[in-house]
């Protein structure tokens, strides 16, 4: 099936109405990556002359250079050029998942108006790089489509309790932190009628600038007065995990400069650090690689889907489970640093995987 995609586009406009389009950012990024105007022009598909004229035109537009050239060394972004590039990347990281959710909703509405035999599986999940690649897994599939919405882990489980989604994303740290995490999620979990589907195992940790100029080594370094932190939003599973790590280390939230400053995705946190607006953030490893940051591992966690047991009997769910167990999904996970899928597609009972739920005498989920 054809799929609508929504992307953000920047237009920079001067007071006299002159405009610069999105090719500005493509060239800035290429120059930043390659360090040479010739290579940057090739990367974005422009002639060298056209690329040179663009750079010269930008310099005149802003009244100050965005790119500087050093004989024998190549091309480099000026502080203004770097700031523009990081601003565009931060906006893309912040809005990207929201636009994906809107596109998913619109695609679903369009499909209802078309003659289609495709069944829909509704997924509400905290943003993760494996989950974000699931639409790619279904590309070209005529019998199955996803309605993928990004919500925090708590919101996703609440959606499942209200029967407004079929699968809810849940990630739980391994080891001693698991019990604390499950205690926070327990309100929305019902071992009698829900099941867990293993998806991936992933590493969460600290994002720091390339070369780690501030010498950040552990969570304890975040309390230093020269360190500024960028956090995830309340309700996100990553925020819950970070709070657990702080509590285990005996660190209060108020001791961290920037704890109350929030972003809504792993990529947005990484972009914030890459822009120099913060010295450290917390999230999954692929986001650090995306923005060329150093990564300090802190915790290993498992990412699951939670669903009602009867949902697993639906034909579309059987098809999705087969796709998750396929070589194609294994290949997708292999491209994600810090990710693995040792038990992907395995279905287990909640209280078998997390006996503390049974020990706590968990009763049917409370509905909001």
Image (spheres, helix red, strand yellow):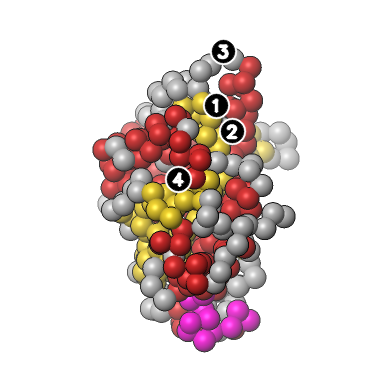
Magenta part of the chain: 244-254
- State which tag comes first along the sequence, 1 or 3: 1
- Front position in the image: 313 or 280: 313
Q: Mark 3 and mark 4 in contact (Cβ < 8 Å)? A: no
In terms of secondary structure, where does tag 4 sit?
helix
Q: Identify the residue at horizontal 46%, vertical 58% (top origin).
A: 350
For residue 251: magenta? yes
Image-quadrant location for residue 148:
top right
Q: Earlier in the sequence, mark 4 or mark 1?
A: 1
| Residue with the mark numbered 2 | 103
Q: Which residue sits furthest top? A: 115
Element carrying mark 3: loop
* Rendering coords of residue 70 (x, y %): 35, 53
Question: Which residue is identified by label 3?
Answer: 115
**What is the C-alpha distance between the residues marked 1 and 3?**
17 Å
Specify whether 221 is left or right of 99.
left
Please tell me which residue is depicted at 48% across the width and 76% down the height of the picture: 245
State how far apart marks 4 and 2 are (Cα): 15 Å
In the displayed structure, 176 sits above or below 107; it is below
Q: Is residue 139 visible?
A: yes
Say which label, 4 or 2, has the lower sequence index. 2
Instruction: Kindly indicate the quadrant of the structure image that contains residue 277.
Output: bottom right
Please tell me how crowded label 1 is: few (under 14), some (14-19), or many (20+) other residues with Cα within 10 Å: few
Q: Nearer the viewer, mark 4 or mark 1?
A: 4
Q: Disc 4 to disc 3, how far (Cα)?
A: 28 Å
Residue tagged 4: 131
Which residue occupies the foreground of this view, 326 or 24? 326
Q: Residue 153: image x %, image y %?
A: 56, 56
Q: Nearer the viewer, residue 158 or 246?
A: 158
188 left or right, relative to 70: right
Q: Where 121 sits versus 254, above or below?
A: above
- At mark 1, the secondary structure is loop
């Amino acid at each position: 099936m054809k799929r609508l995609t929504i992307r953000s586009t920047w237009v920079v406009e001067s007071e006299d109405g002159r405009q610069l389009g999105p090719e500005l950012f493509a060239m800035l990024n290429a120059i930043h990556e390659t360090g040479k105007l010739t290579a940057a022009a090739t990367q974005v598909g422009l002639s060298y002359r056209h690329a040179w004229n663009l750079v010269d035109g930008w310099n005149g537009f802003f009244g100050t250079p965005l790119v500087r050239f050093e004989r024998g060394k190549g091309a480099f972004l000026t502080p203004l050029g770097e700031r523009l590039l990081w601003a565009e990347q931060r906006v893309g990281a912040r809005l990207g998942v929201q636009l994906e959710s809107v596109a998913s909703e619109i695609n679903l509405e369009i499909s209802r108006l078309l003659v289609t035999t495709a069944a829909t599986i509704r997924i509400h999940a905290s943003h993760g790089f494996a989950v974000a690649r699931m639409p790619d897994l279904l590309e070209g599939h005529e019998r199955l489509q996803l309605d993928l919405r990004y919500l925090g882990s708590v919101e996703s489980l609440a959606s499942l309790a209200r029967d407004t989604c079929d699968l809810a994303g849940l990630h739980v740290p391994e080891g001693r932190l698991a019990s604390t995490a499950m205690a926070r999620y327990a309100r929305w979990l019902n071992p009698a009628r829900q099941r867990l589907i293993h998806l991936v195992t992933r590493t969460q940790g600290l994002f720091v600038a390339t070369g780690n100029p501030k010498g950040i080594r552990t969570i304890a370094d975040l309390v230093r007065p020269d360190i500024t932190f960028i956090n995830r939003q309340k309700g996100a599973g990553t925020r819950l995990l970070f709070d657990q790590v702080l509590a285990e280390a005996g660190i209060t939230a108020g001791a961290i400069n920037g704890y109350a400053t929030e972003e809504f995705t792993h990529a947005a946190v990484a972009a914030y650090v890459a822009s120099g607006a913060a010295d450290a953030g917390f999230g999954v490893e692929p986001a650090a690689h995306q923005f060329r940051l150093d990564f300090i591992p802190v915790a290993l966690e498992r990412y699951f889907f939670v669903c009602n047991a009867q949902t697993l009997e639906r034909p579309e769910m059987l098809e999705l489970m087969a796709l998750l167990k396929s070589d194609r999904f294994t290949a997708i996970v292999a491209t994600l640093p810090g990710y693995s899928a040792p038990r992907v597609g395995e279905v287990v009972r909640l209280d078998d995987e997390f006996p503390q739920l049974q020990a706590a005498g968990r009763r049917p989920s409370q509905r909001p």
